[in-house]
């Protein structure tokens, strides 16, 4: 049995801490719990003194807005949620500012949408901004810009956002503070024999629902989004800790190696930043269906994808866009950056590299996707 204290990622210099609405607002509360905020801030202050750099991803804006608006039920429509977020965001930041100021610390607000991360240049700009703040000993507090989002506020539960921020900041660990102790062998609300899983190496789909849903009316993500985020982190080599956020000093205890919560071991060694962005952040603009030989060459032998291995293509992608690769049966294999647009790929699909120039009139690349620009799912 591996002792928790020996996990190298617990000593990571950069750590992303994600705080859920279920931590900041209990099921019988409306608005923010300042005592909880103060406890989290105190722990972060001590971590900074220990030499860590902390990025905070925090929910709670909608809950704070609903209290000011005197709305008792969680809003069903997107405009209502966006309105509550707009009202609640300054309240949330003011609360954080007050608790951190008492500790002699400064904070900065960063609001992101997925489009900020989807484009490589804007992604890098966001990375540089956070780097600059950390170097100045300022705590970045990140949230989704719900008020301008055109999607359902799934990204707004911030589990997915925390995984993206960890990639942006090259953090070695993500700490998810929730209203549950961690992940269990069975649903503890149903099975009294359910055991807390201290160390999870193989995150199977069967574990998604076993912990049960949150009882907090403001908790919009639940275990499904947490597991999805942890899967992404596992794929690119980042460890995760899931802890009950209101436990006294729970972050400090966990990072010292105490056996609290659930520790998730990543499947792979750390993936480089470019591949990480390609595989888990950038959205696919289309797809390529490849034959079995190409699947083996790409996944098993680490080769690039040549035109001869492509069967078909779809979407509206251009040079430099990210596309999903699929098997003959349509199963997703991973994502990569393409060297040709969709119409060009269709023309050279199934052809030899030497034929590209004759078909297209020029040849800039031998490969449709270079192996350095591909990240597989497994």
Image: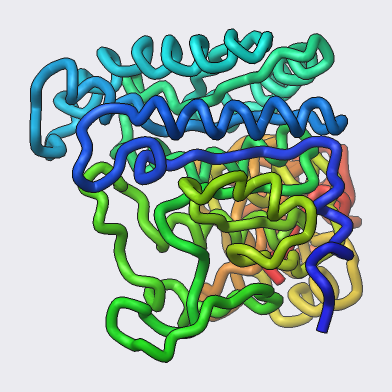
Question: Is residue 290 or residue 230 the one in the foreground?
Answer: 230
For residue 121, what is the image quadrant? Answer: top right
In screen coordinates, is 17 left or right of 181? Answer: right
- Residue 208 in view here: yes
Residue 347 visible in the displayed image:
no
Residue at position x 22%, y 38% from top? 29
Residue beneath the point at 81% across and 69% down: 298
- Left or right, 307 with respect to 199, comes to right
Quadrant in the picture for residue 17: top right
**Is residue 150 positioned above or below 250 on the image?**
above
- Residue 172 position, x and y percent, is 79, 46
> Observer-nearest residue: 356 or 266?
266
Q: Is residue 351 above or below residue 142?
A: below
Tell me the residue at 71%/81% (across/down): 292
- Viewer-nearest residue: 363 or 212: 212
- Give the percent coordinates (x, y) of residue 214: 30, 58
Q: Nearer the viewer, residue 128 or 357?
A: 128
| The C terminus lies in quadrant | bottom right
How many labels were placed on the picture? 0
For residue 199, above or below residue 353: below
Q: Quadrant of the N terminus?
A: bottom right
What colouring method underlies this structural image? rainbow
Instruction: Measuring from the top left, give residue 58's x and y in whole percent.
Output: 48, 31
Residue 307 image position (x, y, % from top left): 77, 60
Which residue lies at the image location 36% right of the left edge and 80% below the top edge?
A: 187
Q: In terms of image quadrants, where is residue 337?
A: top right
């Amino acid at each position: 049995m591996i002792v928790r204290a020996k996990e190298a990622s617990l000593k990571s210099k950069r750590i992303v801490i994600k705080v859920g609405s279920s931590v900041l607002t209990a099921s019988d509360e409306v608005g923010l719990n300042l005592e909880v905020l103060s406890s989290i801030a105190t722990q972060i202050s001590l971590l900074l003194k220990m030499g860590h750099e902390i990025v905070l991803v925090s929910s709670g804006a909608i809950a704070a807005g609903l209290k000011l608006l005197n709305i008792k039920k969680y809003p069903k429509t997107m405009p209502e949620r966006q309105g509550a977020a707009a009202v609640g965001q300054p309240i949330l930041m003011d609360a954080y500012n007050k608790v951190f100021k008492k500790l002699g610390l400064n904070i900065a607000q960063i609001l992101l949408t997925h489009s900020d991360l989807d484009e490589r240049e804007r992604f890098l700009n966001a990375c540089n901004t956070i780097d600059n703040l950390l170097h100045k000993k300022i705590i970045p507090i990140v949230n989704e810009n719900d008020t301008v989002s055109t999607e359902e506020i799934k990204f707004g539960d911030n589990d997915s956002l925390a995984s993206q921020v960890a990639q942006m900041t090259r953090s070695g660990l993500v700490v998810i503070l929730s209203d549950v102790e961690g992940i269990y062998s069975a649903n503890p609300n149903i099975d009294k024999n359910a055991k807390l899983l201290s160390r999870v190496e193989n995150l199977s789909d069967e574990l998604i629902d076993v912990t049960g849903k949150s009882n907090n009316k403001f908790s919009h993500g639940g275990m499904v989004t947490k597991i999805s985020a942890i899967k992404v982190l596992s794929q690119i080599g980042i460890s995760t800790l899931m802890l009950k956020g209101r436990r006294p000093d729970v972050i400090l205890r966990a990072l010292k190696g105490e056996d609290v919560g659930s520790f998730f071991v990543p499947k792979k060694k750390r993936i480089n930043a470019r591949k990480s962005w390609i595989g888990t952040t950038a959205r696919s603009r289309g797809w390529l269906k490849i034959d079995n030989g190409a699947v083996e060459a790409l996944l098993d032998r680490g080769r690039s994808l040549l035109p001869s291995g492509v069967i078909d293509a779809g979407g509206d992608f251009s040079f430099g866009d990210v596309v999903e690769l699929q098997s003959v049966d349509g199963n997703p294999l991973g994502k990569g950056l393409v060297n040709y647009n969709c119409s060009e790929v269709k023309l050279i699909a199934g052809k030899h590299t030497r034929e590209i120039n004759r078909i297209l009139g020029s040849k800039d690349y031998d490969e449709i996707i270079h192996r350095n620009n591909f990240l597989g799912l497994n």
